[in-house]
Each structure stands twice: as structure tokens, then as C-alpha cells.
Image (cartoon, rainbow, N blue to C red):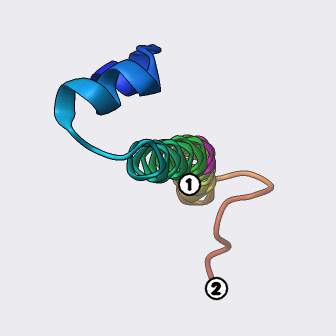
Amino acid sequence: MLRLLAGDSVELLSRELGLPVFKLEQWRQKAEAALDGALKERDADAAEDGQLAAALRRVGELSMENELLRSRMERPGPLGRRRSR
């Protein structure tokens, strides 16, 4: 099969292996379809990985903002907590 995908002659392989040409052509079509499917799946995985990385970055940014706001609330001043008198 690898020789067929590499470009060897279908007729030559048919004679060497004792298989009909149509069977080799069927196998090649199935192999090409499987390769196409695997490549599309890999592209989808890469896109999902990028989206996940962006989401994790955003979660990190929001966590930092929350920590900064919490620390500002602990200090006296306009954003600090008011004590009851």
C-alpha cells in the first residue's frame, strides 16, 4: 500500500502481488480518505488547543484582577472597606 501511495505503478504492483487493479485502487481510495480525515481532525484539534490557551490566559487575567481588587479593598481609601462608627 505504501508503494502505491508513493506513486508506484498500479499495473506493476498488480502483477507483482497478484491482485486485481480495481482492488488496489479501492485500497488507495480508502487510504487517502483516512489520511484526509486524520488531517482534518488534527486541524480541528489545533484550533481547539488555541481556543483553550486563549481561555486559560483570560482566566489568569481575571484572577489577577480579582486579587488586585481584593488587596485594594483591604487598604484604607476610596476603594477600601468602610468601618462602621
How crowded pointer 1 is (Cα within 10 Å; few <14, some 14-19, many 20+) is rated as: few
x, y percent for residue 18: 21, 38
By secondary structure, the bulk of the magenta-drawn segment is best described as helix
Q: Quadrant of residue 19?
A: top left
Residue furthest right as drawn: 78
Q: Which residue is mark 2?
A: 84
Q: Nearer the viewer, mark 2 or mark 1?
A: 1
Q: Residue at x 63, y 49 (%)?
A: 51
- Camera-nearest residue between 28 and 17: 17
Q: Secondary structure at mark 1?
A: helix
x, y percent for residue 79: 75, 58
Whole-angstrom CA distance, mark 2 to mark 1, is: 35 Å
x, y percent for residue 54: 62, 44
Q: Residue at x 64, y 69 (%)?
A: 81
- Camera-nearest residue between 26 and 83: 26
Q: Quadrant of residue 43?
A: top right
Assess whether mark 1 and mark 2 are in contact (beta carbons under 8 angstroms).
no
Q: Residue at x 65, y 85 (%)?
A: 85
**Which portion, as a residue range, is magenta?**
47-54
- Camera-nearest residue between 76 and 49: 49
Q: Residue at x 41, y 15 (%)?
A: 6
The amino acid pointed to by label 1 is Val
Q: Secondary structure at mark 2?
A: loop
x, y percent for residue 32: 51, 42
Report the disc number at residue 59: 1
Residue 4 counted in the magenta span: no
The amino acid pointed to by label 2 is Ser
Judge from the rendering whether residue 12 lies leftward or rightward of residue 29; answer left or right. Answer: left
How crowded pointer 2 is (Cα within 10 Å; few <14, some 14-19, many 20+) is rated as: few
Q: Earlier in the sequence, mark 2 or mark 1?
A: 1
Q: Quadrant of the N terminus?
A: top left
